[in-house]
Image: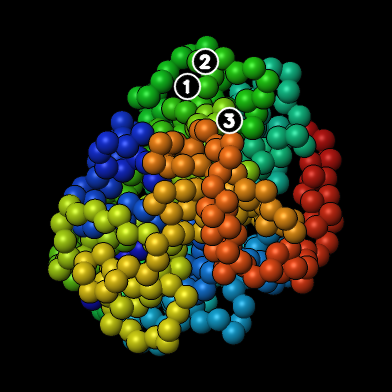
Amino acid sequence: MNMVVICCDTFRADIVGAGKKLSHVKTPHLDQLASDGLTFNRCFAEGLPTIPFRRCVFTGIPSFPWRFDTPNEGLQPAGSGWHPIPPEQDTLAERLHDAGFVTGLVADTYHMFKPTQNFTRGFLSWRFIRGQEQDGYRSGPLSRIDLAAHVRDGDADLRKHAVTVQYLLNMLDRQEGEENYLAAQVFREASQWVEDNRGNKPFFLWIDSFSPHELWDPPRQYADAYFSDPSVKDYIHHRALSGDATDAEIERTKALYMGYVTFVDRWIGHLLETIDRLNLRDDTVVMFISDHGTQLMDRGQFGKGGNALFPFNTQINWIVRHPDGPRGQQTDIWTQNQDITPTILNMLGVEYEEMHGADAWAGATGGAEPARDYITTGWATSFNVRDDRYSVHMDVGTRSPQATVYDLSVDADEENPLTDPPREVVARALERARTVIGDFPDVFSAYKQRHAARAMRTFMNKYNLGT
């Protein structure tokens, strides 16, 4: 059995399928994938964001709480948990390679390829597609970019908008035609890898698409399908939308994200069509996952962060199309990203020692009892405990965390925290937190970041050379 895993960054879990908040966003190819497979409806990330999530998925070992130094030289951002895979931890690709799989990685998630990272371990081949966000792909000429088109009038400051500047530089020579956008390049390259390796069975391909992460820059017709107003600028990085945004500006920024999602889906379709064209569907598992979501004014702002560990940020996609698996089914068992590695290994018949996660496929299809009755998510020192009835938010970086509690039975969107939450609910959440973390905040005392200020200063001084 072969396997292709598609991992998309910043792809909300309330889009694919019917009856969800953003089901109106067009994703026909992923909708079809869900119709042909099994969807895990209650899958949540355990440690966020980008690098902590992927390290957990690649090892089956939870990233949270943060237990290792973050080597900041050559790394920006340098947030909590943004360290490489420790050498003593085996990776998914290494395990599969040792079991006889031809392993490949195609990605434009540039954080995975920074000098401090090692996410290519175990892959026989890897293709890094350059140019996303702050990827230091180009440094000039600054005179050719049009920053003013994407920021407030009079606010075209290069250092203030350094992320947008870097991205615009990276995209300077992007030729016309949507096939030249980064998401298209990723899935075209992945399709070529499948074609090249169809005779190298069994194979395992991991595709890591940074899209639809910021900057929200799809071909404009995709955004126009959701909202179009020629008088409104395209704020491809929502942080430029400072001050009192108009309704039209907000709707256009939402449209940029939604159009980006539809654009990514279109090129996922290209990959799926390649698998079918090569007659690989009957012996290839296809899995779609995401690392986290993002706010689209759900709490009055755009973006994501540890201060909002709500499902629009923390819930993740997990869809599996197995040649011999269920069709069009959904499961409500609680799952997390540490379950993905043991699930893959079991599906592919690769033995492994006991892991932190569990085989969610067996739990969903009746082969085993579900592994958990609650989930936890950590970001920096923010922490969330979630079960069928309650969602409890706290800062575990303090000795006496104050709990904010939502009763999901009457407040599914977590908009009205309980003024007097039941003591037993808070006590249970704290105990569950300690089960994951240990005694807090002592667990964070051994964790430190080195030279963070130097890394940030270097980045912020990048554009001191003038225009």
Label 3: few (<14), some or many (≥20) within 10 Å?
A: some
Q: Label 2 amino acid? A: Asp
Q: Secondary structure at mark 2?
A: helix
**Percent from the top left, x then y, of residue 380?**
66, 55
Instruction: Answer yes or no: is residue 269 visible.
Output: yes
Of labels 1 and 3, earlier in sequence is 1
Instruction: Answer yes or no: is residue 384 visible.
Output: no
Q: Label 3 amino acid? A: Gln
Q: Which residue is mark 2?
A: 247
Q: Nearer the viewer, mark 1 or mark 3?
A: 3
- Rendered image: mark on residue 301: 3
- Rendered image: mark on residue 332: none
Label 2: few (<14), some or many (≥20) within 10 Å?
A: few
**Percent from the top left, x then y, of residue 335?**
39, 61
**Percent from the top left, x then y, of residue 238?**
59, 31
Q: Nearer the viewer, mark 3 or mark 2?
A: 3
Q: Taking 135 as reference, is 203 above or below it?
A: below
| Real-space Cα separation, disc 1 to disc 2, in angstroms | 6 Å
Q: Residue at x 31, y 31 (%)?
A: 24
Residue 83 occupies which quadrant of the picture? Answer: bottom right
**Percent from the top left, x then y, of residue 86?**
62, 78
Q: Label 1 amino acid? A: Glu
